[in-house]
Amino acid sequence: MVSELAQRLLAWFDQNARALPWRESPPHPYRVWVSEVMLQQTQVETVLPYYQRWMTRFPDLETLAAATEQEVLRLWEGLGYYQRARALHRAAQILVRERDGCFPQRATEWQTLPGIGPYTAAAIASIAFGEVVLALDGNVRRVLARLFDLDLPVDSPAGERELRRIGQVHVPIDRPGDFNQALMDLGATLCRPQTPQCEVCPVAGLCLARARGTQSLRPVRRRGGAVPHYIVTAAVIWRGEQVLLAQRPPQGLLGGLWEFPGGKQEPGESLEEALQREIREELGTTIVVGEKVGVFRHAYSHFRVTLHAFHCCLVGGEPQPLEATALEWVPVTRLTHYPMGKLDRQIAQTLMQARPSASAG
DNA sequence: AAGACGTGGTG
DNA sequence: TCACCAAGTCT
């Protein structure tokens, strides 16, 4: 028997589902997969242009597997969590090499691939292969926490177990993928974190938080700590018309992306001293710090930075990639070809505006 | 198991 | 300016 919750949700979804490019009939595993990875911690509106560009350049599994990592990162630039792009690329190569280009069907198989966790595996398996599994993401957590007025933190192990237990029994065997997407659409459009639109919600009559007036208290979350703020420096080291870029190591923050070398200011250091020290440590050489390029601010997920960038000249020996994966001298006009994070892209943009190419002017 | 991991939108 | 949040995964 189908739960009333599922019936109402699906009826609403049939009328109100958002038209999204990866929602096709029948759904295509590759396109559903790419969309789900892009959508990890990222809103639909942000994903749309990236998805379109991706599908134009990498229309299928084989094309993606054959691409270079640099091109993959360049298309991903701006989406964040760059490990997702690298994992997607690696998984494509695994499927082509080890499975002859055939997609898994079960969620448990999908989850063995890099970049695919419990949520994404369940989403793909239910949407593209009809597996009856709950796809528990942030939206679904919030919707279920309200429907059942759950007072456990939804991001705790106990809370998650409870949500799975509560939610799984409602997944209908005939339309598991639509059910999951209906829950997510509801969370994204009506059952929003602030000021949920209960008046027009198709399942308001079944909602315990609505009945008790506790919508704004759900979901309960554990508190995060304060985020640190760092002062960092970056060097634009010139050699003729070229500047020096360093490629960050594959693991960790902005893995595989390119940057202007530099680093944190330590207590007691001037900006210039910090930059000279960082260049000595990272490149094994010495610079003269000149005019300021600009000051840039940025908030990462777990800290904030204020970045001071300076024009610099090399006075020591040839730079060595002591901490970077690679170093390259790059003409300013070619900086767009190197994938970068937000801050370094801002520096690059500033340089390109200051020294426009002849053809662009 | 808690923290690392991007970026943009919102109140 | 700031805290919180968003279709999570990895270690």
Image (cartoon, coloured by chain):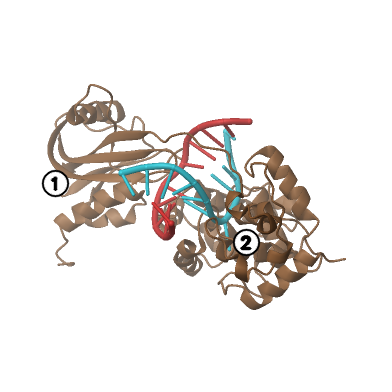
Chain colours: A brown, B red, C cyan
- Dot 1, crowdedness within 10 Å: few (<14), some or many (≥20)? few
User: Which chain contains the residue that carries disc 2?
Assistant: A
Q: Nearer the viewer, residue A320 or A289?
A: A289
Q: Looking at the image, which residue sits at the far right?
A: A1
Query: Considering only vertical position in the picture, is A136 above or below A173?
Result: above
Query: Considering only vertical position in the picture, is A265 above or below A360?
Result: above
Badge 2 amino acid = Met
What residue do we see at 30% from left, 51% from top? A345
What residue do we see at 36% from left, 48% from top? A341
Task: Assign a secondary structure to mark 2.
Answer: helix
Q: Looking at the image, which residue sits at the far top?
A: A268
Residue A109 appears in view? yes
Q: Position of residue A26 (x, y in %)?
A: 69, 74
Residue A184, labelled with which disc?
2
Residue A236 appears in view? no
Badge 1 amino acid = Gly
- Dot 2, crowdedness within 10 Å: few (<14), some or many (≥20)? many
A338 sits to left or right of A318: right
Task: Look at mark 1 in the image and give the residue it sits on.
Answer: A240
